[in-house]
Amino acid sequence: MDDAETPVAASSSPPSRDRFAPLWEPPPTSRRGRPPRVSRDQVVDAAVAIADADGLDAVSMRTVARSLDVGAMTLYSHVPGRDELVDAMVDRAYADLALPDADLSWRPALEQYAHGYWSLLRDHPWLLDLNTWRLPLAPHVFDAEEAAYRILLDTGLSGTRVVETVRIVNNTVAGFARAAAAEDADARAHGTDYASYWEASTDFWEHLFDPARYPSMTRLWSVGAFDSSSMPFDLHISGLLDTLELLIDRAQADGPAHIPTYEECMTHYDDRVADELHPPQP
């Protein structure tokens, strides 16, 4: 397999069983021949370390092999190619996500989940380069989704609104993380941190800014709305949670939506799966 091709963030091909099964099933142990020089976990950890340091584009079978001091062909006994390696990297990164306590009420649990996701993206910013609509079918990714849905499942929101709300929270957190990553990149490139950048713009505010042209900004400035110098590096979602609280209160007042219990779902689970996978022909 040629390792010189331009790396891509992830494959757009539909996932086959050969691609996702290794994420769920432990690799078979061979008792024949020499023991492998490196393990699959070592390969994945090395790839994650490269991506954390230099970005996802820096990860290739060759760079990972070089970091482990083995030949590239050694890696192919653990992962068939780069796409499968990236899948395993995502699963490994998501294993670091601190999931909220199941006993917490929805608001502190959702805030805890959001901060955990924020920390995940700050520790592994290369995750922001992936298409979140096509994350790998991986156990730790599913663990994160399960925890997020569980938080809102019995709040009275409809099933559709639960899924939409989790997506909104994820996208909000990712937006903050993406801005923070961009600020990190600018600070490295120009040697100027966030506070120093804005401190150096005093002349603009004194001589060029026109309060009459920007009255809304002026009014917000007058009450200190722009005073947080650490804004790119803090996660602020209290306003989002306040809005969600209003939606939940209204849903409960109107009559909470009924989402079947797990036991109710399982009574027809096999039939439902069969219908989804093999819909009746007209």
Image: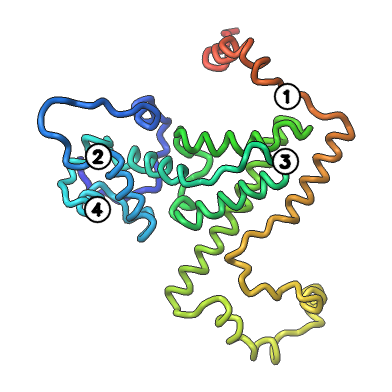
Neighbour tally class for label 2: few under 14, some 14-19, many 20 plus, Cα within 10 Å:
some
Q: CA distance from mark 2 to mark 1?
A: 43 Å
Q: Horizontal and vertical percent for residue 119?
A: 53, 54
- Report the side of 86 relative to 258 (left or right): left
Contact check, label 4 and label 1, Cβ < 8 Å:
no
Q: CA distance from mark 4 to mark 1?
A: 48 Å
Q: Nearer the viewer, mark 3 or mark 2?
A: 3
Q: Nearer the viewer, residue 18 or 214?
A: 18
User: What quarter of the picture does the N terminus occupy?
Assistant: top left
The kind of residue tagged 2 is Ser
**Label 4: which residue?**
63
Residue at image coords 66%, 49%: 111
Contact check, label 1 and label 3, Cβ < 8 Å:
no
Q: Secondary structure at mark 4?
A: helix
Q: Horizontal and vertical percent for residue 67?
A: 23, 54
Q: CA distance from mark 1 to mark 3?
A: 18 Å
The kind of residue tagged 3 is Ser
**Label 2: which residue?**
39
N-terminal of the two: label 3 or label 2? 2
Q: CA distance from mark 2 to mark 4?
A: 16 Å
**Label 1: which residue?**
259
N-terminal of the two: label 2 or label 1? 2
Residue at image coords 61%, 46%: 113
**Label 3: which residue?**
105
